[in-house]
Image (spheres, rainbow, N blue to C red):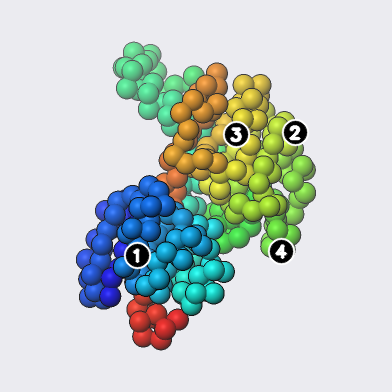
């Protein structure tokens, strides 16, 4: 059996040798275009992909393909319906990175509330050495305790964030973008009210027709001054051009781990905002703790093993 991984670089330094028991495995760090995809999969029995698109044209051209292993949860890069029509099994993995994303959510929140980037640089610039007292009050730290934390998207990640934030003493509100997630433990607010009310707003929703461009200029203007806005859900939920505009008008703090286009576009409007201290962007790493990658790939392994044993 021949296995081909089209974007191994998206899985860090994971050791793929465990898959060799199933047959030959060919690894490509990245796969850039459709011609490469087809050329690399034309003799493959099993394709492994994270973000590389396997569409109808690719499936048609790769007649030996029997199984597609998605090394993620979302299947929007695969034409699942056409794969099914061609009797190709498609298997994904859910829930592998919940705590990793939750941890990154709070890393971003605390970076702002505790002024971590500012004070790190302040000390490294030698200013503590020159201080007449043992501490510094050029920035004032604030606690989560007593703050109103609004959560957009109360799925598995949103619920964990709510639970931890509540343990820190926050009052939790939520808005369900699907309307399906109801929780009697927390207060539900319509989106406008949540944005106007909350000191911290964190996004944990998927990207779909209901969430695309959810936070555009009119909505972003509702945010309180000094509000902290975190997006570890999906890029495209926040209109980034509108966000850059509002960040030049209001004193809001914004932490992003996802953008609409990834990698980030050169000359992105967020790179040009006036108060850069109010913005932290990380390159879609919230999901990628070592533990999360190990869990993900062990489940990919199990998916392959189950298909070999049971054909499903």
Q: Which residue is mark 4?
A: 180
Mark 1 Cα shell of 10 Å, populated few (<14), some (14-19), many (≥20): some
Choose mark 4 or mark 3, whichever is in front: 3
Which residue is the site of mark 2? 218
Q: Is residue 227 left or right of residue 134?
A: right
What residue is drawn where x is 70% and y is 52%? Answer: 210
**Residue in the image at 52% along x and 21% along y:** 272
Along the viewing direction, whichever of 118 and 25 lies nearer the viewer: 25
- The answer to which of marks 4 and 2 sits earlier in the sequence is 4
Quadrant where the N terminus lies?
A: bottom left
**Which numbered disc flags the more N-terminal residue, 2 or 1?**
1
Seen from the viewer's position, the closer of residues 61 and 237 is: 61
**Closer to us: mark 2 or mark 1?**
1
Residue at figure coordinates x 42%, y 83% from the top left? 311
Q: Counting residues from the N terminus, which is met first, the one under dot 1 or under dot 4?
A: 1
Label 1, label 4: how far apart the Cα atoms are: 41 Å
Image coordinates of residue 216 in percent, x first then y, are 69, 36
Q: Quadrant of the C terminus?
A: bottom left
- The Cα–Cα distance between marks 2 and 1, rounded to whole angstroms, is 49 Å
Q: Is residue 239 left or right of residue 73?
A: right
Q: Are marks 4 and 3 in contact (CB under 8 Å)?
A: no
Residues at marks 3 and 2 touching, judged by CB atoms closer than 8 Å: no
- Looking at the rendered structure, the secondary structure element under dot 3 is helix
- Disc 2 crowd rating (10 Å Cα; few below 14, some 14-19, many 20+) is few
Asked if 69 appears above or below 169 in the picture, the reply is below
Q: Position of residue 219 (x, y in %)?
A: 73, 37
């Amino acid at each position: 059996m021949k296995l081909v991984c089209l974007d191994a670089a998206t899985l860090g330094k994971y050791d793929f040798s465990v898959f060799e028991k199933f047959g030959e495995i060919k690894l490509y760090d990245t796969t850039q275009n459709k011609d490469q995809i087809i050329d690399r999969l034309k003799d493959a029995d099993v394709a492994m992909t994270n973000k590389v698109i396997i569409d109808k044209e690719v499936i048609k051209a790769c007649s030996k393909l029997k199984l597609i292993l998605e090394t993620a949860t979302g299947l929007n890069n695969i034409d699942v319906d056409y794969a099914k029509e061609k009797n190709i099994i498609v298997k994904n993995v859910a829930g592998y990175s919940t705590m990793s994303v939750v941890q990154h959510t709070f890393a971003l929140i605390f970076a702002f509330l505790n002024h971590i980037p500012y004070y790190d640089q302040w000390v490294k610039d030698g200013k503590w050495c020159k201080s007449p007292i043992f501490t510094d009050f050029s920035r004032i730290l604030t606690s989560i305790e007593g703050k109103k934390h609004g959560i957009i998207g109360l799925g598995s990640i949103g619920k964990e964030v709510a639970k931890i934030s509540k343990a820190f003493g926050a009052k939790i509100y939520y808005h369900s973008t699907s309307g399906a997630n109801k929780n009697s433990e927390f207060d539900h607010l319509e989106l406008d009210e949540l944005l106007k009310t909350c000191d911290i707003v964190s996004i944990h929703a998927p990207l779909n027709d209901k969430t695309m461009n959810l936070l555009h200029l009119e909505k972003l203007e509702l945010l309180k001054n000094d509000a902290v806005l975190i997006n570890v859900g999906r890029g495209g939920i926040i209109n980034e051009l509108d966000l850059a505009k509002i960040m030049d008008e209001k004193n809001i703090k914004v932490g992003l781990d996802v953008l609409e286009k990834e990698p980030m576009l050169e000359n992105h409007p967020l790179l040009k905002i006036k108060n850069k201290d109010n913005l932290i962007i990380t390159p879609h790493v919230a999901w990628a703790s070592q533990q999360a990658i190990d869990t993900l790939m062990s489940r990919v392994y199990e998916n392959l093993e189950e298909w070999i044993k049971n054909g499903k």
